[in-house]
Image (cartoon, rainbow, N blue to C red):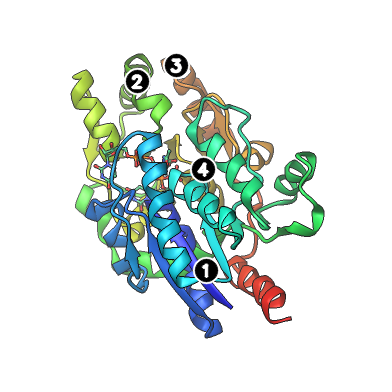
Amino acid sequence: MKTAIILGTRPEIIKMAPIIRALEKSGTDFFILHTGQHYTYKLDRVFFEQLQLPDARYNLDVGSGTHGIQTGKILEGADRILLAEKPDVVLVEGDTNSVFAGALSACKLGIKVGHVEAGLRSYDRSMPEEINRILADHCADYLFAPTSSARQILLGEGIPEEKIFITGNTIVDALQQNLSLAKSKTTILSDLNVKPHNYFLITLHRQENVDVQARFASIIKGLQGLVKEFNIPVIYPIHPRSRKMLTQFALETSGINLIDPIDFLEFLVLESNAKLVLTDSGGVQEESCILNVPCVTLRDNTERTETIEIGCNIIAGTSTDKILECTHIMLSRKNSWINPYGDGKTGERIINILKGVFHG
Ligand code: UD1
Ligand code: UDP
């Protein structure tokens, strides 16, 4: 079995890491094709170093651009490499342009596609990620659904049940493999001069939030409201997209502690010790749930619906008042939910399934 891992952004590197570990352990042939969608050290290389991942054999260096430019460049580059390498299976994870373009290239070349984190739906087609995940699922031959509700969604879209495997989410593996190391190695709390459970942690980078001035401004106001009401730090490791838009809109951020993106181990420590997390990230909604930290989602919907059902997450949207109200609601809840995303063996499970297919 020869596997091609196609990835291109921060969350894909983090969530593919347990699969790459499992591939290394299995002794089967594999290589990494990096699209280059993320290229800044703090969104890319730092995770290869910290998670001790093998270097990508190829980097398409597609960089930033419109959705069409990124998707088109990835298709062109992936076609060329997949034709030369002839893998038996291509694995992609999540819902970015890299994921959809990687899956489409392989599918059109007649190479089997495995989609990790299949079956998530926000039912909001204005989000580029929703389009990417639907199309990737429908290109895939093996759909690795994190939960039974994701499987139900796929069945509802007519995907044959023999293609769908409930595996859990590799983010649980990533946390289990890194959390104790993170706690022993990082000094982020003292670096930022914050005390455990005495600060809010923010991440915010979605196109529909930060590229729209009124929405971004309203969220910033909500965060400033938190500072006023709780009188504790609000820490926001800011994605370069958001930094760029903040400057472009000249938004006033006094009271919010803006820092550069941090590495995974630092982020895990900051996240697991937060009083509460406010985010529009998919991965951060899952992680906070697994780490038993309440979450307020700064979006109008979520595809991580399990987190809402078990009570660890709430949808606030972007209005200033609602952000404050939802923070109070979440702080009044008991953090006693059960992680719906599996046992931390998802990476190995996925590789075992594929070995069963290709080695019989
Ligand atoms: C992408 C994904 C999003 C995912 C996020 C993870 C799509 C459609 N979006 O969003 O689903 O949640 O990655 O973080 O695939 N930039 C840099 N350095 C980089 C990369 C980007 O400075 O290494 C800046 C550039 O100004 C760029 C902007 O960020 O224009 C947006 O980058 P892009 O790759 O288009 O999307 P993300 O917002 O990163
Ligand atoms: N993350 C990180 N440093 C940061 C912010 C986030 O390492 O400064 C990690 C976080 O632990 C999670 C992932 O990045 O695993 C989430 O990525 P992102 O929010 O960029 O993408 P999404 O999950 O929304 O696609």
Question: In the rendered image of this protein, does residue 243 appear above or below residue 284?
Answer: above
Could you tell which of marks 3 and 2 lies nearer the N-terminus?
A: 2
Q: Is residue 355 left or right of residue 177?
A: right
Count of numbered circles in the view: 4
Q: Which mark is residue 19?
A: 1
Could you tell which of marks 3 and 4 lies nearer the N-terminus?
A: 4
Could you tell which of marks 2 and 1 lies nearer the N-terminus?
A: 1
Could you tell which of marks 3 and 1 lies nearer the N-terminus?
A: 1
- Tell me if residue 61 can be seen: yes
Percent coordinates x, y for residue 252 in the rendering: 20, 20
Pointer 3 local density, CA inside 10 Å: few below 14, some 14–19, many at least 20 = many
Question: In the rendered image of this protein, does residue 66 appear above or below residue 155?
Answer: above
Looking at numbered disc 3 in the image, what kind of residue is underneath it? Ser
Looking at numbered disc 4 in the image, what kind of residue is underneath it? Gln
Residue at figure coordinates x 52%, y 85% from the top left: 27
Percent coordinates x, y for residue 197 in the rendering: 40, 45
Percent coordinates x, y for residue 218 in the rendering: 36, 17
Q: Which residue is mark 3?
A: 319
- Closer mark to the observer between disc 1 and disc 4: 1
Label 4 CB-ligand 2 distance < 8 A: yes
Residue at figure coordinates x 65%, y 58% from the top left: 168
Looking at numbered disc 2 in the image, what kind of residue is underneath it? Gly
Q: Which residue is mark 4?
A: 285
Label 3 CB-ligand 2 distance < 8 A: no
Looking at numbered disc 1 in the image, what kind of residue is underneath it? Ile
Give the CA separation, mark 1 to mark 4. Answer: 21 Å
